[in-house]
Amino acid sequence: TFLYLVKRGYFKDLRLLLCQKTPPLYGPSPNPPTQLSAALLDLIQRPLQLISQINVPEYSDTVVTEFTAAFLCNPYPEPVEMFVLPALINDPNKRFPFLSLLHSLYMDKFTSG
């Protein structure tokens, strides 16, 4: 189900919703400013968590590529820079798939031009 959603703009839609519904932030913090922000972060993390639990290369590649395109390849809006990135890095229970990210970057899917 996540693969279907991710291929159809799941992460881009979550980024848009997060930017529209997150109140102004005063500094970087892994703590969600609202309950809605916490729920949106959970929705961002769920497909990323499955990467380490299943061994399906297409799933891993697609999820990491789409996550990177939506959240990391553009200038960071305030909610992404001040909340999402600190939260992804600082949550010990939900580990970010850094190896899959590095592999995706290595495969050069994000060339400019």
Image: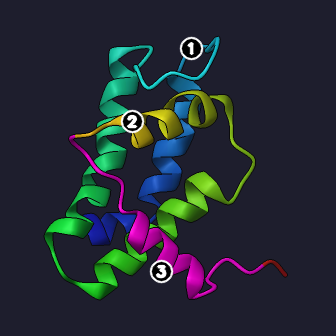
Picture quarter with the C terminus: bottom right
Count the numbered circles shown: 3
| Amino acid on which the number 2 mark rests in the picture | Asn
- 55 sits left or right of 92 in the view: left
Residue range corresponding to the magenta coloring: 93-111
Among numbered discs 1 and 3, the one appearing first in the sequence = 1
Q: Which mark is residue 23?
A: 1
Q: Which residue is mark 3?
A: 103
Magenta stretch contains residue 105: yes
What SS does tag 3 mark?
A: helix
Give the Cα separation between the discs numbered 1 and 3: 34 Å
Where residue 34 sits, quadrant-wise, is top left
Element on which disc 1 rests: loop
Residue 98: assigned label: none
Q: Nearer the viewer, residue 64 or 21?
A: 64
Q: Nearer the viewer, mark 1 or mark 3?
A: 3
